[in-house]
Amino acid sequence: YALDWEAEALEDSRELLDLLSATALARYASLEGELEAVIKAQIEGSRTELRRADVASARRAEEAALGRLIGCDSLRLNTVRHLPPVDRPEGGWLGLSPASAPSVLAARARARAARTAAEAAARGLAPDLDLGARARWEEGEPFVMQLTAAASPPLWGGAQARVRAAEAHSAALAADAKATAAVADAEIARLVAEWDLAERQLRRYREQIVPLARQALEASRAAYGVGRTDFSSMVESFLRWRDARSAEARLEAARYTAYAELMSFGAIVRGPQQP
């Protein structure tokens, strides 16, 4: 999304630079401008083309990485114009819990399996018990019942070593599960902080920086057209506007990325409620 927005901004930049370059050339031809303005326009045009090539290459790399994940060698994505609207609910994040993280679930499953194995090994230390009964009766003799019991102990040394190893492994995996949960809890805090920061900065760019940069560019173009400012000032205003548009897209992408990662922890995020 951010790359597509930057590509669009660069395309608009190319068209605007072509116009500025033609204007600078016309003024130079009529002896109203300097050759410096023409050269600067050509330099900025070349820089814009280089950046467009970089953005296109970065997009192909992202497509290749995503294609490997889904097993598609020739993945081609359409231009991403919009991201789904996501806003932080008035009540804050609901259901955030490290217990819902895939890494925590996997670690706890490994710990449970190790604990089950350790319990099974401990049961193996109990001796095998054989019970038997025998009865005898002859005429004129009393009835005799004989009960027998025999215990067959396991090989204690090897069995106990296996039990201790299984218990140590179980304890290690239990500690690993706790550590994984602590890391997931810290990750939640980081993502919430990233969401809040991206949300504040995105609002500032949308409401202040981008509109002001656009106004400054228009004012600079008008001033340059009547000879009240030089070409360098107009190019500076142009670059400021282009960078502001690209930064706005990157912030929106960062906010959505934080939202998507928070969803893996079971966060319930709702958009604006319609009346």
Image (cartoon, rainbow, N blue to C red):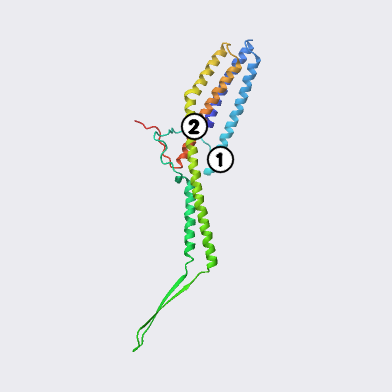
* Residue 211 can be seen, yes or no: yes
Q: CA distance from mark 2 to mark 1?
A: 28 Å
Left or right of 274: which side holds 152?
right
Residue at the bottom extreme, as displayed: 140
Q: Tell me the amino acid under the disc marked 1.
A: Ala
Label 2: state its secondary structure: helix
Q: Closer to the camera, 104 or 64?
A: 104
**Above or below, comparing residue 95 to residue 154 in the picture:** above
Instruction: Tell me residue 27's x, y (percent).
Output: 61, 12
Instruction: Tell me residue 224's x, y (percent).
Output: 57, 14
Left or right of 154: which side holds 44?
right
| Badge number at residue 193 | none
Instruction: Tell me residue 77's x, y (percent).
Output: 52, 36
Please name the residue shown 51% across and 51% down the image: 175
Looking at the rendering, in which quadrant would you find the C terminus?
top left
Q: Closer to the camera, 201 or 79?
A: 201
Label 1: state its secondary structure: helix
**Above or below, comparing residue 222 to residue 124 in the picture:** above
Q: Nearer the viewer, mark 2 or mark 1?
A: 2
* Residue 80 can be seen, yes or no: no
- Within-10-Å neighbours for mark 2: few <14, some 14–19, many 20+: some
Left or right of 258: which side holds 43?
right
The part of the image, by quadrant, that contains residue 134 is bottom left
Q: Tell me the amino acid under the disc marked 2.
A: Leu
| Residue for badge 2 | 197
Please name the residue shown 59% across and 17% down the image: 233
**Above or below, comparing residue 134 to residue 161 in the picture:** below
Q: Closer to the camera, 9 or 87?
A: 87
| Residue for badge 1 | 65
Instruction: Tell me residue 139's x, y (percent).
Output: 34, 89
